[in-house]
Amino acid sequence: MGTEEAHDDHGHHLPAVEDWPRGFGEASWWPFVTAVGAAGIYAGAGLYILSRGDNAIVGPMVGPGALVGSIAIFLAGLYGWTYHAFVSHFWSRDASEKGANKLRWGMLAFLGSELSTFGALFGYYFYIRAGEWSDIFVGVPELVGSLVLINTALLIASSFTLHWAHVAIRKNDRKKFLGGLALTLLLGVVFIGGRGV
């Protein structure tokens, strides 16, 4: 089967250049690397247990070394898998209206699920914090403090910076995209830090 026969529209496509093993369509070796790393995490934890006690079977650094190495392999596999599946072809993609419509509906479904989840969590939080009300609005603890307002402002600001990054990537401005994404990440880290206070 030659390259010119790849456009038959019979549902079979030749493998991409970086696919391995060859001949298996959209095969990728990154899931295998990730699985090896995940299995190594369990093996490292087991070796760590075997290195403890008076009758240690392996040396004291074998388990932690295998565990740290396996975590590194697992994270590298996840990165490679994600990069191969989503990032490597992003800048050369065809931005058709049909694809954009699918992405728009996917984002709306995601936002709806987030709104429902956090709405339920906030409702539960308010219910638990308020406790039983003997009289209406008597003895109700202050639910909206300065920390809650600051964290809410951080979340709202991060949604604007993420939208700014999204607009930048649609205009093929990689520098502004990375800046908006970094700013969103920074706001998220500050939000998580505020949760610990």
Image (tube, rainbow, N blue to C red):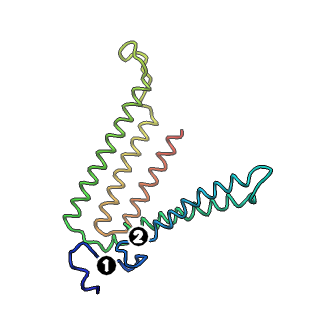
Total residue callouts: 2
Determine which of the numbered discs, if any, sits on residue 84 in the image. Answer: 2
Determine which quarter of the picture holds residue 94.
Answer: bottom left
Separation of residues labelled 2 and 1 (CA atoms): 16 Å
- Residue 74 against residue 18 in the figure, above or below: above
How busy is the neighbourhood of tag 1: few (under 14 within 10 Å), some, or many (20 plus)? some
Task: Give residue 110's position: percent from left, percent from top.
Answer: 31, 50
Task: Give residue 144's position: percent from left, percent from top.
Answer: 41, 31
- In front: mark 2 or mark 1? 1
- Residue 103 against residue 11 in the figure, above or below: above
Task: Give residue 141's position: percent from left, percent from top.
Answer: 44, 23
Determine which quarter of the picture holds residue 25.
Answer: bottom left
Q: Amino acid at mark 2?
A: His
Q: Amino acid at mark 1?
A: Leu
How busy is the neighbourhood of tag 2: few (under 14 within 10 Å), some, or many (20 plus)? some
Q: Are marks 2 and 1 in contact (CB under 8 Å)?
A: no
